[in-house]
Image (cartoon, helix red, strand yellow):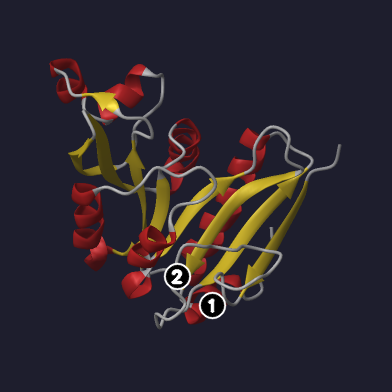
């Protein structure tokens, strides 16, 4: 089977379109968010995620050179609020699942959820870290990648200390709007074992995503 990659865009993710549609936001609010998807067909979900992420990050580093790449990771499931959980936190628990934790640590934060706790964390990534970061996103599907200027690191720390809701198909609109402030580009994986296409989705300001998408190729 031949692997195919395509890049598609929409000017507004809050209106009906066949690329990327987000719900859960009051359209009375003055918000504007565009979307890009890197979609890979003819590959397993894991292969599609990596091919799409490498293409996206390669273009991002060329067209948005002032942006750094971060992972905002979290436990999707609520953890017991135990001594073991508070000792292992997030990164050690991921390492215990045979995942490689890469990048420069921004911190780990516990957020109460019912009778338990969810751990959140952030790390600044380098170019060689992408595949390891994608493995974490596959393992914990409420995790995201974010491309943003380094001056915005306090926003990422703030997001981590507050946490964000668990997600099934895509992060909540309010989470994406918060992370897209001040030139941020949040990204997440899509595509399961029975989907024809899998890859990486991103949202951001229309001007920024137009710049990122112009002339984009696989």
The location of residue 61, given as percent across then percent down, is: 47, 62
The location of residue 22, given as percent across then percent down, is: 54, 62
Between residues 78 and 200, which one lies in front from this camera angle? 78
Q: Is residue 162 above or below residue 37?
A: above
Badge 1 element: helix
Between residues 58 and 111, which one lies in front from this camera angle? 111
Residue 3 in which image quadrant: top right
Q: Is residue 90 visible?
A: yes
Total numbered labels placed on residues in the image:
2
Q: Residue at x 70, y 33 (%)?
A: 44
Image quarter where the N terminus lies is top right
Task: Characterize the local packing of mark 1: few (<14), some (14-19) or many (20 or more) Cα atoms within 10 angstroms.
Answer: some
Mark 2 vs 1: CB contact within 8 A: yes
Residue 12 in which image quadrant: bottom right
In the image, taking residue 173 as reference, residue 84 lies left or right, namely left
In the image, taking residue 190 as reference, residue 80 lies left or right, namely left
The location of residue 45, given as percent across then percent down, is: 66, 36
The location of residue 72, given as percent across then percent down, is: 34, 47
The residue tagged 2 is 64
Badge 2 element: loop
Q: Is residue 132 above or below residue 205?
A: above
Res 104 label? none
The residue tagged 1 is 211
Q: Residue at x 34, y 26 (%)?
A: 94
Q: Residue at x 68, y 53 (%)?
A: 39
Marks 2/1: CA distance?
Answer: 8 Å
């Amino acid at each position: 089977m031949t692997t195919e990659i395509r890049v598609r865009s929409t000017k507004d993710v809050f209106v009906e379109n066949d690329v990327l549609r987000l719900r859960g936001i009051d359209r009375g609010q003055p918000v504007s968010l565009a979307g890009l998807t890197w979609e890979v067909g003819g590959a397993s979900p894991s292969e599609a995620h990596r091919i799409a992420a490498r293409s996206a990050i390669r273009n991002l580093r060329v067209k948005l050179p002032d942006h750094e790449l971060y992972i905002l990771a979290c436990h999707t499931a609520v953890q017991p609020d135990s001594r073991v959980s508070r000792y292992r936190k997030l990164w050690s628990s991921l390492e215990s699942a045979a995942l490689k934790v890469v990048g420069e640590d921004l911190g780990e934060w516990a957020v109460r959820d019912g009778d338990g706790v969810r751990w959140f964390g952030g790390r600044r990534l380098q170019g060689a870290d992408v595949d390891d970061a994608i493995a974490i996103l596959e393992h914990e599907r409420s995790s995201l990648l974010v491309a943003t200027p380094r001056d915005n690191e306090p926003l990422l720390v703030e997001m981590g200390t507050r946490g964000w809701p668990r997600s099934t198909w895509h992060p909540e609109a309010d989470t994406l709007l918060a992370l897209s402030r001040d030139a941020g580009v949040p990204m997440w994986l899509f595509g399961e074992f029975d989907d024809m296409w899998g890859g990486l989705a991103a949202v951001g300001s229309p001007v920024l995503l137009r710049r990122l998408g112009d002339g984009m190729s696989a």
